[in-house]
Amino acid sequence: MANKSHTLNFGWNLIAHKDYKLFSNQNEYVLMDWDGDVVLCVSVQDHEIEVLRSNWNLHFKVNLAFKTIKVFNEPDEEE
């Protein structure tokens, strides 16, 4: 697993596979996968996070104590 950490506003961090692309507009973030599909839209504030949209099969965890969002999905390995 080759993860990359992205620093978000208010001390939040997003950890996901390096092939994801993250786009932001102030405190809102859009995460796109390796196929160009939007998989997660979130808004962050100092003490809260709002999930605006999530792909039905996205596996992620939010750790409030460490202000971290971790995405577990990875691209399929080509054979």
Image (cartoon, rainbow, N blue to C red):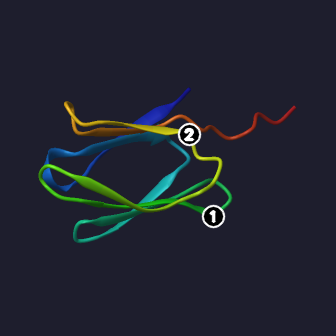
**Amino acid type, label 2:** His
Q: Is 58 situated left or right of 5 in this image? A: right
The circle drawn on residue 59 is 2
The percent position of residue 34, horizontal first and vertical second, equals: 63, 53
Task: Count neighbours of disc 1 (C-alpha within 10 A) and say few if under 14, some if 14 to 19, many if 20 or more.
Answer: few
Q: Whole-Å distance between the Cαs marked 2 and 1?
A: 17 Å
Q: Nearer the viewer, mark 2 or mark 1?
A: 2
Task: Count neighbours of disc 2 (C-alpha within 10 A) and say few if under 14, some if 14 to 19, many if 20 or more.
Answer: few
Q: Is 38 situated left or right of 71 in this image? A: right
Residue at (62, 37) in percent of width and height? 74
Which corner quadrant holds the N terminus? Answer: top right
Residue at (60, 38) in percent of width and height? 73
Up/down of 75 relative to 66, above or below: below
Which quarter of the picture shows residue 22?
Answer: bottom left
Which residue is the site of mark 1? 36
Residue at (54, 34) in percent of width and height? 72
Residue at (48, 39) in percent of width and height? 60
Q: Is 51 situated left or right of 39 in this image? A: left
Up/down of 71 relative to 47, above or below: above
The percent position of residue 44, horizontal first and vertical second, equals: 24, 58
Disc 2, SS: loop
Q: Earlier in the sequence, mark 2 or mark 1?
A: 1
**Amino acid type, label 1:** Gly
Q: Please identify the residue farthest to the top as the structure is shown.
A: 1
Which corner quadrant holds the C terminus? Answer: top right
> Which residue occupies the foreground of this view, 35 or 11?
11
